[in-house]
């Protein structure tokens, strides 16, 4: 099952499936609004069940591909795809909070999950890991950094980890001061120097919120306290992350910045596929650079640490606020630096209420969205106190 098949990750998953028809078969697909792309994927990969966001789009799909495929819609439809029998793995590659309910349902139904949708772990952290443990299900990381850590840990004792070091490319604004980021445009923010990704994660990379979300993801995936997770800027995106062990030795995973690497690994683990990505030639790369994060210019990273140390609902609140703010920035309603302002202001609304199930998480998400929309609107209206 592939959730988010029309996106940047989804298309790369299908590239690998296409190259390995002997190993992989698509049972179900889920996407949002890109119906033409989805219809082409249905013709090529012949899934049994497909989900799309809207009812009108579902009718268009039924007309385009004919009978024989069950077409379902909305959140419930995606949950149905995620839990339909007959698949060995659910690949969760929807962007944002929209991906959580179906990923949760897959885990609840005992399906192993390859997890690209980092927002699932950010929002529901310990809860979904507990659920996975109870159902005996594995969550394979797909994010290149977490795949790197996972690979660095194979054969090692997790109790011996001293520190996890996440690398960050620094995005398009690496080295810039906060003052110089005041008037950056949407196109400048979308021009990522090393990775080709969907728009939301590309903006998150420009603000470093993406690294913040990854810190939260690493905290849960590797059971590492926030003070044991560091971030270092590495513009070449060749070292995908590192683990320092208690004896002082560090193991890193390297490769070209190409998501087919971690996607292929998540699909084939514990085996490896052959030639899924371009090979690394370090003599061509030449030099690798590492730098500290400028927390003043990129405050979103610290907001993530703050959320981890805050109320139980704080990570979900931060995630929702960020999604609202990124949408507002992409729509041209607020400025680049306002993304961090909306996120910080909304984070203060985290209630400290207990979060003990999916409905609590979704409630925190909905409340934070309302608050963030209010702040974003105030900023759009030029209210400097917002
Ligand atoms: N791209 C990367 O290199 C990369 C690397 C690491 C981690 N990730 C993570 O992987 C996830 C996907 O990222 P991406 O870059 O592939 O995003 P993307 O290109 O924007 O694709 C997002 C996918 O989610 C679908 N979607 C969005 N809202 C939906 C909804 N309400 N219902 C059903 N489907 C919905 C989209 O469908 P439509 O397009 O049809 O609307 C699309 O298939 C994110 O969580 C991201 O953080 C991505």
Image (tube, rainbow, N blue to C red):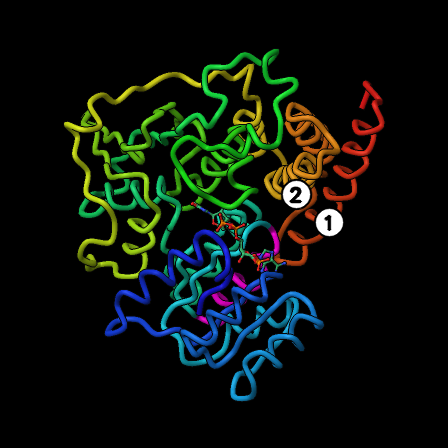
**Looking at the image, which residue is at 41% across and 62% down?**
113
Q: Alpha-carbon neighbours of circle 1 within 10 Å: few (<14), some, or many (≥20)? A: some
**Looking at the image, which residue is at 48% across and 15% down?**
294
Q: Where is residue 161 in the image (x, y as percent from the top left)?
A: 28, 34
Asked if labels 1 and 2 touch by Cβ distance under 8 angstroms, the answer is yes
- Per the image, the residue denoted by label 2 is 320
**In which quarter of the view is residue 320 placed?**
top right
Q: Where is residue 349 in the image (x, y as percent from the top left)?
A: 74, 34
Q: State which tag comes first along the sequence, 2 or 1.
A: 2
- Per the image, the residue denoted by label 1 is 366
Residue in front for this viewpoint, 307 or 272: 272
Does the magenta segment cover residue 163?
A: no
Q: Is residue 15 visible?
A: yes
Q: Is mark 2 on a helix, strand or loop?
A: helix
Question: Residue 36 bears which disc, if any?
Answer: none
Q: Can residue 352 be seen in this view?
A: no
Q: Which range of residues does the magenta coloring cover? A: 97-110
Does the magenta segment cover residue 104?
A: yes
Q: Where is residue 1 in the image (x, y as percent from the top left)?
A: 44, 70
Q: Position of residue 324 (x, y in %)?
A: 69, 41
């Amino acid at each position: 099952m592939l959730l988010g098949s029309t996106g940047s990750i989804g298309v790369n998953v299908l590239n690998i499936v296409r190259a390995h028809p002997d190993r992989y078969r698509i049972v179900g697909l889920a996407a949002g609004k890109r119906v033409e792309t989805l219809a082409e994927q249905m013709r090529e990969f012949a899934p049994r069940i497909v989900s799309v966001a809207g009812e009108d789009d579902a009718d268009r799909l039924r007309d385009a591909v004919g009978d024989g495929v069950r077409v379902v819609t909305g959140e419930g439809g995606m949950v149905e795809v995620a839990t339909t029998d007959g698949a060995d793995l659910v690949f969760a590659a929807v962007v944002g909070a929209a991906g959580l309910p179906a990923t949760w349902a897959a885990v609840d139904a005992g399906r192993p999950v390859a997890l690209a949708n980092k927002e699932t772990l950010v929002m529901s952290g310990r809860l979904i890991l507990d659920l996975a443990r109870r159902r005996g299900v594995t969550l394979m990381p797909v994010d290149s950094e977490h795949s790197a850590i996972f690979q660095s840990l194979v054969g090692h004792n997790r109790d011996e980890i001293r520190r996890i070091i996440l690398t960050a490319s620094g995005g398009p604004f690496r080295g810039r001061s906060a003052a110089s980021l005041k008037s950056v445009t949407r196109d400048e923010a979308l021009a990522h120097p090393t990775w080709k990704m969907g728009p939301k994660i590309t903006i998150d990379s420009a603000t470093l919120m993406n690294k913040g979300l990854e810190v939260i993801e690493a905290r849960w995936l590797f059971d590492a306290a926030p003070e044991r997770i560091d971030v270092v800027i590495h513009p070449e995106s060749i070292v995908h992350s590192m683990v320092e062990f208690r004896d002082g030795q560090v193991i890193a995973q390297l490769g070209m910045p190409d998501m087919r690497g971690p996607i292929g690994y998540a699909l084939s683990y514990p085996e490896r596929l052959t030639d899924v990505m371009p090979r690394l030639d370090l003599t061509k790369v030449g030099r690798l650079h590492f730098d500290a994060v400028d927390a003043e210019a990129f405050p979103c990273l610290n907001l993530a640490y703050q959320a981890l140390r805050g109320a139980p609902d704080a990570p979900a609140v931060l995630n929702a606020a960020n999604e609202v703010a990124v949408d507002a920035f992409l729509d041209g309603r607020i400025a680049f630096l306002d993304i961090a302002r909306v996120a910080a202001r909304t984070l203060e609304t985290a209630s400290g209420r207990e979060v003990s199930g999916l409905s609590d998480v979704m409630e925190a998400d909905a409340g934070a969205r309302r608050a963030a929309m209010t702040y974003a609107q105030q900023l759009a209206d030029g209210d400097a106190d917002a």
